[in-house]
Image (spheres, grey):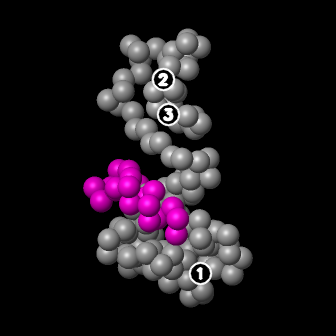
Amino acid sequence: FTGIFLGSKDEAISTFEKAGLRDPDIFKESDSVEFEFSSHADVQLFKICYQLGQSPSPSFWQSEWTSASYNVCEDLGIDPDEYCHTKFFYGSITTPVLLPNCDYNQVSFNLEDVKNVILPAIKAAAIKPQPWFNRPGSQKW
């Protein structure tokens, strides 16, 4: 199950159980990943940040989300050594991209860093029309 519930994890479980939409024999809490955020905006920013690292296509980076330098953390003004991981364009071992650690499958993932550093940096970039965040495509091409 993938989705957004505007409430706590406990409220979600209770609501789904009361509605008969959660079968404890099928749904195993140990198999699930849940995150709680303070606003719907933070949920959407997290989804954007997570999606940055999920696209397998270089054209996605070049036309949709590529930062000016291929170092998204630096472009967001956050420390790449502390808050980033390296990913390569699909099929390329020569074009690294430094991405914020929003991928919960990465060993370096830290939800508190995401909430306190990464999401505020994305939010700050998103509200300004001039930064790379709102001007798709690499400045390198």
**Local crowd size for mark 3, using a 10 Å CA cut-off: few (<14), some (14–19), many (≥20):** some
- The mark closer to the camera, 3 or 2, is 3
Q: Position of residue 1 (x, y in %)?
A: 51, 31
Number of the label disc, if any, that sits on residue 106? none
Q: Residue at x 46, y 27 (%)?
A: 10
Q: Position of residue 130 (x, y in %)?
A: 69, 81
Q: Circle 2 is placed at which residue position?
A: 13
Number of the label disc, if any, that sits on residue 8? 3
**Local crowd size for mark 2, using a 10 Å CA cut-off: few (<14), some (14–19), many (≥20):** some
> Disc 1 residue type?
Ser
Number of the label disc, if any, that sits on residue 138? 1
Q: Residue at x 54, y 47 (%)?
A: 38
> Disc 3 residue type?
Ser
> Disc 2 residue type?
Ile
* Residue nearest the observer in this picture, 25 or 8: 8
CB atoms of marks 3 and 2 within 8 Å: no
* Range of residues picked out in magenta: 103-121
| Residue at mark 3 to residue at mark 2: CA–CA distance | 9 Å
Q: Position of residue 96 (x, y in %)?
A: 40, 76
